[in-house]
Image (cartoon, helix red, strand yellow):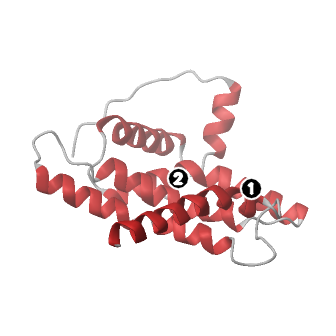
Amino acid sequence: MAKSIPISVRLSDDDFEFLASYEVQGARTPSDKMREILRIAREREEGTQDVAACEDMLRSMTRPAERGLRQLQRETGMRSDFVIKLYERLPEMVAELVAAAPGPDMGQEELKQFEASLSAEVALIEEIFDLGLTSQSRTYDPELMDRGLEPILEIARLLVERKRQAGA
Protein backbone atom coordinates (compact mmCIF):
# COMPACT_ATOMS: atom_id res chain seq x y z
CA MET A 1 0.00 0.00 0.00
CA ALA A 2 1.20 3.51 -0.77
CA LYS A 3 2.47 5.66 2.04
CA SER A 4 -0.10 8.08 3.46
CA ILE A 5 0.91 11.68 3.98
CA PRO A 6 -1.16 13.71 6.44
CA ILE A 7 -2.21 17.17 5.27
CA SER A 8 -4.14 19.97 6.89
CA VAL A 9 -6.81 21.93 5.09
CA ARG A 10 -8.79 24.99 6.07
CA LEU A 11 -12.37 24.98 4.83
CA SER A 12 -15.05 27.63 4.82
CA ASP A 13 -18.20 26.89 6.78
CA ASP A 14 -20.05 26.23 3.52
CA ASP A 15 -17.39 23.79 2.30
CA PHE A 16 -17.37 21.99 5.64
CA GLU A 17 -21.16 21.69 5.60
CA PHE A 18 -20.99 20.34 2.06
CA LEU A 19 -18.35 17.78 3.01
CA ALA A 20 -20.36 16.70 6.03
CA SER A 21 -23.51 16.18 3.95
CA TYR A 22 -21.71 14.72 0.90
CA GLU A 23 -22.83 11.13 0.44
CA VAL A 24 -20.16 8.69 -0.65
CA GLN A 25 -20.73 4.97 -0.45
CA GLY A 26 -18.47 3.53 2.25
CA ALA A 27 -17.04 6.92 3.27
CA ARG A 28 -18.03 8.17 6.69
CA THR A 29 -15.24 10.47 7.88
CA PRO A 30 -14.17 13.74 6.25
CA SER A 31 -10.85 12.06 5.38
CA ASP A 32 -12.63 9.18 3.62
CA LYS A 33 -14.78 11.66 1.71
CA MET A 34 -11.77 13.76 0.68
CA ARG A 35 -9.99 10.63 -0.60
CA GLU A 36 -13.07 9.75 -2.65
CA ILE A 37 -13.30 13.28 -4.05
CA LEU A 38 -9.62 13.07 -5.05
CA ARG A 39 -10.15 9.63 -6.64
CA ILE A 40 -13.04 10.98 -8.72
CA ALA A 41 -11.02 14.05 -9.75
CA ARG A 42 -8.07 11.84 -10.74
CA GLU A 43 -10.30 9.60 -12.86
CA ARG A 44 -11.77 12.65 -14.56
CA GLU A 45 -8.34 14.17 -15.19
CA GLU A 46 -6.67 11.00 -16.40
CA GLY A 47 -9.68 9.84 -18.37
CA THR A 48 -10.91 6.34 -18.00
CA GLN A 49 -10.93 3.62 -20.61
CA ASP A 50 -13.47 1.60 -18.66
CA VAL A 51 -16.96 2.31 -20.00
CA ALA A 52 -18.68 0.99 -16.86
CA ALA A 53 -16.54 3.13 -14.53
CA CYS A 54 -17.11 6.17 -16.73
CA GLU A 55 -20.87 5.54 -16.71
CA ASP A 56 -20.82 5.21 -12.90
CA MET A 57 -18.96 8.50 -12.62
CA LEU A 58 -21.44 10.26 -14.93
CA ARG A 59 -24.39 8.83 -13.04
CA SER A 60 -22.93 10.05 -9.76
CA MET A 61 -22.62 13.51 -11.30
CA THR A 62 -26.25 13.59 -12.48
CA ARG A 63 -27.78 11.82 -9.46
CA PRO A 64 -28.37 14.96 -7.34
CA ALA A 65 -30.15 16.75 -10.19
CA GLU A 66 -32.23 13.68 -11.03
CA ARG A 67 -33.15 13.18 -7.38
CA GLY A 68 -34.27 16.82 -7.12
CA LEU A 69 -36.26 16.57 -10.33
CA ARG A 70 -38.03 13.39 -9.21
CA GLN A 71 -38.92 15.10 -5.92
CA LEU A 72 -40.32 18.11 -7.79
CA GLN A 73 -42.32 15.80 -10.05
CA ARG A 74 -43.85 14.12 -6.99
CA GLU A 75 -44.69 17.48 -5.43
CA THR A 76 -46.25 18.93 -8.58
CA GLY A 77 -47.90 15.74 -9.81
CA MET A 78 -46.28 16.29 -13.21
CA ARG A 79 -44.13 13.67 -14.92
CA SER A 80 -42.01 13.58 -18.04
CA ASP A 81 -40.94 10.20 -19.35
CA PHE A 82 -38.84 12.12 -21.86
CA VAL A 83 -36.72 13.84 -19.19
CA ILE A 84 -36.38 10.68 -17.07
CA LYS A 85 -35.35 8.71 -20.17
CA LEU A 86 -32.55 11.22 -20.80
CA TYR A 87 -31.28 10.84 -17.23
CA GLU A 88 -31.30 7.07 -17.70
CA ARG A 89 -29.74 6.84 -21.15
CA LEU A 90 -27.39 9.80 -21.59
CA PRO A 91 -24.77 8.59 -19.07
CA GLU A 92 -24.55 5.31 -21.03
CA MET A 93 -24.17 7.17 -24.30
CA VAL A 94 -21.60 9.67 -23.05
CA ALA A 95 -19.61 6.91 -21.32
CA GLU A 96 -19.42 5.02 -24.60
CA LEU A 97 -18.41 8.20 -26.42
CA VAL A 98 -15.69 9.06 -23.89
CA ALA A 99 -14.31 5.77 -22.62
CA ALA A 100 -14.56 3.61 -25.73
CA ALA A 101 -13.07 6.19 -28.11
CA PRO A 102 -10.14 4.80 -30.09
CA GLY A 103 -6.76 6.24 -29.23
CA PRO A 104 -4.30 7.85 -31.64
CA ASP A 105 -2.53 4.53 -32.24
CA MET A 106 -5.69 2.83 -33.50
CA GLY A 107 -6.68 2.21 -37.10
CA GLN A 108 -9.63 2.04 -39.45
CA GLU A 109 -11.11 -1.14 -37.96
CA GLU A 110 -11.20 0.38 -34.47
CA LEU A 111 -12.89 3.49 -35.88
CA LYS A 112 -15.54 1.35 -37.59
CA GLN A 113 -16.09 -0.69 -34.44
CA PHE A 114 -16.40 2.50 -32.36
CA GLU A 115 -18.94 3.92 -34.78
CA ALA A 116 -20.93 0.67 -34.75
CA SER A 117 -21.04 0.59 -30.96
CA LEU A 118 -22.24 4.21 -30.88
CA SER A 119 -24.93 3.49 -33.46
CA ALA A 120 -26.43 0.95 -31.05
CA GLU A 121 -26.98 3.85 -28.63
CA VAL A 122 -29.25 5.48 -31.21
CA ALA A 123 -32.00 3.29 -29.76
CA LEU A 124 -32.70 6.34 -27.61
CA ILE A 125 -34.22 7.97 -30.69
CA GLU A 126 -36.63 5.04 -31.02
CA GLU A 127 -37.55 5.37 -27.36
CA ILE A 128 -38.25 9.09 -27.82
CA PHE A 129 -40.37 8.36 -30.90
CA ASP A 130 -42.31 5.89 -28.77
CA LEU A 131 -43.26 8.76 -26.47
CA GLY A 132 -44.97 10.40 -29.43
CA LEU A 133 -47.17 7.36 -30.13
CA THR A 134 -49.66 7.88 -27.35
CA SER A 135 -52.44 10.40 -27.75
CA GLN A 136 -51.62 11.82 -24.28
CA SER A 137 -47.94 12.73 -24.37
CA ARG A 138 -45.96 11.65 -21.31
CA THR A 139 -44.22 15.02 -21.04
CA TYR A 140 -44.74 18.19 -19.01
CA ASP A 141 -45.95 19.96 -22.14
CA PRO A 142 -48.54 17.72 -23.86
CA GLU A 143 -47.71 19.14 -27.29
CA LEU A 144 -43.92 18.87 -26.95
CA MET A 145 -43.55 15.58 -28.80
CA ASP A 146 -45.80 16.66 -31.67
CA ARG A 147 -43.83 19.87 -32.17
CA GLY A 148 -40.45 18.20 -31.71
CA LEU A 149 -41.09 15.15 -33.84
CA GLU A 150 -42.68 16.89 -36.83
CA PRO A 151 -39.36 18.10 -38.36
CA ILE A 152 -37.83 14.68 -37.76
CA LEU A 153 -40.78 12.94 -39.41
CA GLU A 154 -40.42 15.28 -42.39
CA ILE A 155 -36.77 14.27 -42.71
CA ALA A 156 -37.79 10.60 -42.48
CA ARG A 157 -40.39 11.09 -45.24
CA LEU A 158 -37.76 12.74 -47.45
CA LEU A 159 -35.34 9.87 -46.83
CA VAL A 160 -37.98 7.29 -47.73
CA GLU A 161 -38.81 9.18 -50.92
CA ARG A 162 -35.14 9.46 -51.83
CA LYS A 163 -34.63 5.70 -51.34
CA ARG A 164 -37.68 4.97 -53.49
CA GLN A 165 -36.34 7.18 -56.28
CA ALA A 166 -32.88 5.58 -56.02
CA GLY A 167 -34.43 2.10 -56.24
CA ALA A 168 -36.58 2.98 -59.24
x, y percent for residue 4: 30, 36
Question: Looking at the rendering, which quadrant does residue 12 occupy?
Answer: top right
Q: Residue at x 70, y 26 (%)?
A: 13
Relative to residue 110, is residue 77 drawn left or right? right
Question: Looking at the rendering, which quadrant does residue 10 occupy?
Answer: top right
Q: Secondary structure at mark 1?
A: helix
Q: Amino acid at mark 2?
A: Ser
Q: Amino acid at mark 1?
A: Leu
Q: Residue furthest bottom?
A: 134
Relative to residue 1, is residue 4 drawn left or right? right
x, y percent for residue 128: 60, 67
Near-viewer residue (155 or 93)? 155
Q: Secondary structure at mark 2?
A: helix
x, y percent for residue 130: 62, 75
Q: Residue at x 46, y 40 (%)?
A: 37
Q: Cα distance, mark 2 to mark 1?
A: 15 Å
Q: Which residue is mark 2?
A: 60
Q: Which residue is mark 1?
A: 69
Viewer-nearest of discs 2 and 1: 1
Near-viewer residue (67 or 113)? 113
Can the viewer see residue 28 in this picture?
no
Label 2: few (<14), some or many (≥20) within 10 Å?
Answer: some
x, y percent for residue 90: 51, 56
- Marks counted in the figure total 2
Near-viewer residue (104 or 24)? 104
